[in-house]
Amino acid sequence: MKVSAKVPAEGTLQAVATALAALGVGVATYIAIAEADGGAPACFAGGGGCETVAASSHSELAGISVAVLGIVGYLLLLGTALLRGDGGRLAGFGLALVGFGYSVYLTWLELFVIDAICQWCVVSAVLMTALFAVNATRMVCYVGAEGTTP
Amino acid sequence: MSGASGDGERRQRLIKLGSAVGFLAIVVVAVLIVVGQSGSDGGDASSVDGAAEVRAELKGIPQRGLVLGDPAAEVNLVEFGDLQCPVCKGYAEEIVPAVIQSRVRSGEARIEFRNFTIIDEQSIDAAAAAIAAGEQGRGWDFVELFYRNQGIEASGYVTDEFLTAVAEAAGVPDIERWDASRQSRDTIAAVEAETGEAGDLGLTGTPSFVIEGPRVEGGQEVLGTPGDAGTLESAIEAAG
């Protein structure tokens, strides 16, 4: 299969996805630890946005911390970034789409329901958006091609 | 030629599979959203839950109006809240109970709920109902139970039926008197006065906390929206 010269090599896309997912694990882990005892992550710009979001009932899904779900999601994305072949391409695309869609929903909640913005949640949403873009490019451009390693 | 054609067909099949994966992912997101919403639906007049839990939390602590705790306590922690506010619900369930048990039950401080109605007209109905419950010694039971059964913000769930169900579960002894009081001009004026006071203090959102005590400069200090019980407990210690 021929791939346009403008599209990065699949190995590059996998390396970028690996770095983004690892960063996501770090961010989600920090939020989960900060919220563990009823606290909140430190918002550098002040204003109490992180505290407000952390105290919101929307910070949990069916009793599970959204930050913990984030850790699981980023770890799975890390796994798909390292997985070669069509399995990794399709799974990475599907998981990144779930993460991106749920991030859009969480951002909407922050803006229009909770009325507060947590900077760490914004960082996570940006990482998830980038992961979706990278995984979608990998899937569209390389599905059906021979597997590569990052 | 046939190899290239085979590769093309395989790729077409995989693109279709990718589309199916994308569709499945969208379904998963929709399910996550529905689960998230169903967990916070509330607002059901036919099933007001948590009465026993609230009773146990407040048992043995004096209350008068919307003030909980020893009336002679030197320190007064004021929470300005809107009963429809989902963040206030989070505080009522996760942060305020710890302060009540550690500082209010001991008599070190009292905690007062004042209405800051910022969401819609039904916030005023809810606030008036809380004040009317407070007149019969069940103000904090009402506030805590309302939060535990809170519905989706501004969805119209704060009906007469819902408020009555909460008042009954809160143990308001004379529902007829409560019903008349919550609709009285004086009670509505009291709600407006509390909201006006929040504006005068420069508060911009709910919940917002204010501490009053002998060691507070000027007698009163705005704490804003601290994200944990420890910050409120420290403020109480410093104020007394």
Image: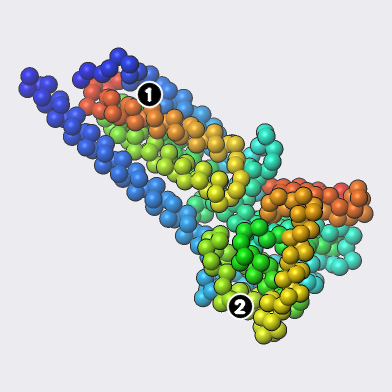
Q: Position of residue B168 (x, y in %)?
A: 63, 79
Q: For the point 34% across and 49% down, which residue is it?
A: B27
Residue A35 quadrant: top right
Quick one: quadrant of the C terminus of chain A?
top left
Chain at numbered mark 2: B
Chain at numbered mark 1: A
User: For numbered disc 2, what is the local secondary structure?
Assistant: helix
For the residues labelled 2 and 1, say whether their Cβ atoms are less than 8 Å apart: no
> What label sits on residue A146 in the rendered view?
none
- On screen, residue B139 versus residue A62, left or right, reads right
Q: For the point 52% across and 48% down, which residue is it?
A: A109
The label nearer to you, 2 versus 1, is: 2
Whole-angstrom CA distance, mark 2 to mark 1, is 59 Å
Identify residue type, mark 1.
Answer: Gln
Q: Position of residue B62 (x, y in %)?
A: 80, 71
Residue A116 quadrant: top right
Which residue in the protein does label 1 denote? A14
Q: B55 and B79: which one is in front?
A: B79
Q: Are marks 2 and 1 on the same chain?
A: no
Identify residue type, mark 2.
Answer: Thr
Vertical relation: A42 (above or below) A6 = below
The answer to whether residue A25 shows anywhere in this view is no
Residue B69 quadrant: bottom right
Q: For the point 51% across and 76% down, which residue is it?
A: B46
Vertical relation: A40 (above or below) A146 = below
The answer to whether residue B91 shows anywhere in this view is yes
Which residue in the protein does label 2 denote? B164
Vertical relation: B10 (above or below) B99 = above
Quick one: quadrant of the N terminus of chain A?
top left
> Around disc 2, counting alpha carbons within 10 Å, would you say few (fewer than 14), some (14 to 19), or many (20 or more)?
some
